[in-house]
């Protein structure tokens, strides 16, 4: 459905920069992109040049939420071209989760004959979208930025998603033991990349396990990784929900907490998470 960007013959970085600088001013990213979730009422859009940080504890569903936002952008009214750096999961797993979200069919049931028609329709829908997946695993920040430039100039991507910060490395660090310094350097380079390419960069990052299971995260938790992340990010969102011991059949309540918004207010929106389908949806509005 989507091609691995490393399989494509690509121009040099200098050629990419020239192409980016001469892109048509009518590009749809001029006004920004919507996530398709109720956080759009708070942040309005994710604008060009912005670094959007999505943070949460391990196994809380950050990758699933990223996939859902990417699908909303690519398949919604904006029909945006999306680049995804999946550093934790291979591309085939990301695509499988996309199909599960689109069809509400568990990956465990993909072999059933009765659901092949639904999967085929979803696969055809995905194949017509412009979603590029790079699944190189752990990657150096210089290499990531170079590939992002090529995605932008050759395929005109309107947003780049990166899953996740902890799997990005840098060869420029003299003190390899200082993770905070490394993360600070990476976040500043990703902010600069967003501004250079004039598109939003959505960066996923994990919070430390020392946070209580049901404790709502805050900016102080992100500072434990590096204070520069808070400084570089235009928008910081935390994903928070209950974490059951097994995957339930019912939807789980979840929250997206907008803790920093350089262009407006902060706040919290409620979602429902269907872990069986890797699917997030806006929670129904309470009757008043």
Image (cartoon, rainbow, N blue to C red):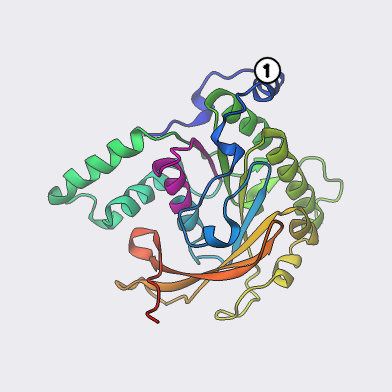
- How many numbered circles does the render carry? 1
- The image quarter containing residue 257 is bottom right
Q: Residue at x 47, y 47 (%)?
A: 70
Front residue (pair 51, 39): 39
Q: Secondary structure at mark 1?
A: helix
Relative to 260, residue 186 above or below: above
Q: Residue at x 62, y 34 (%)?
A: 148
Residue 56: percent from left, percent from top: 58, 65
Relative to 155, residue 236 above or below: below
Instruction: Say which quadrant the N terminus sits in.
Output: top left
Residue 197: percent from left, percent from top: 67, 34
Asked whether 156 falls inside the magenta stretch, the response is no
Front residue (pair 79, 239): 79
The answer to whether 60 appears left or right of 147 in the picture is left
Residue 114: percent from left, percent from top: 12, 50
- The image quarter containing residue 105 is bottom left
What segment carries the magenta color?
Answer: 68-86
Q: Residues within 10 Å of mark 1 (few under 14, many from 20)?
A: some
Q: Which residue is mark 1?
A: 15
The answer to whether 103 appears left or right of 13 in the picture is left
Relative to 208, residue 162 above or below: above
Residue 59: percent from left, percent from top: 50, 65
Asked whether 79 falls inside the magenta stretch, the response is yes
The answer to whether 99 appears left or right of 88 in the picture is left
């Amino acid at each position: 459905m989507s091609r691995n960007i490393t399989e494509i013959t690509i121009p040099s970085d200098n050629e990419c920069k020239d192409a980016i600088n001469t892109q048509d001013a009518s590009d749809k990213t001029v006004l920004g992109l919507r996530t398709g979730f109720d956080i759009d009422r708070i942040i309005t859009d994710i604008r060009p040049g912005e670094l959007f940080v999505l943070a949460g504890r391990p196994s809380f569903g950050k990758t699933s939420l990223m996939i859902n936002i990417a699908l909303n952008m690519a398949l919604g009214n904006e029909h945006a071209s999306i680049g995804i750096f999946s550093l934790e999961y291979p591309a085939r797993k990301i695509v499988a989760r996309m199909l599960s979200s689109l069809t509400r069919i568990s990956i465990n049931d993909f072999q059933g004959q009765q659901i092949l028609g639904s999967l085929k329709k979803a696969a055809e829908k995905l194949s017509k979208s412009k979603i590029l997946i790079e699944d190189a695993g752990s990657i150096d920040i210089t290499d990531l930025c170079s590939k992002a430039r090529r995605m932008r100039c050759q395929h005109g991507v309107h947003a780049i998603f990166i899953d996740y910060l902890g799997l990005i490395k840098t060869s420029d660090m003299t003190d390899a033991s200082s993770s905070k310094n490394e993360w600070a350097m990476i976040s500043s380079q990703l902010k600069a990349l967003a501004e250079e390419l004039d598109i939003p960069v959505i960066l996923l990052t994990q919070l430390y396990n020392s946070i209580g299971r049901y404790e709502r995260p805050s900016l102080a938790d992100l500072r434990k990784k590096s204070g520069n992340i808070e400084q570089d990010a235009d928008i910081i969102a935390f994903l928070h929900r209950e974490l059951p011991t097994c995957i339930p059949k019912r939807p789980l309540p979840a929250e997206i907490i907008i803790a920093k918004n350089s262009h407006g207010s902060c706040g919290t929106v409620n979602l429902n998470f269907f872990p069986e389908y890797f699917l997030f949806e806006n929670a129904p509005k309470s009757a008043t």
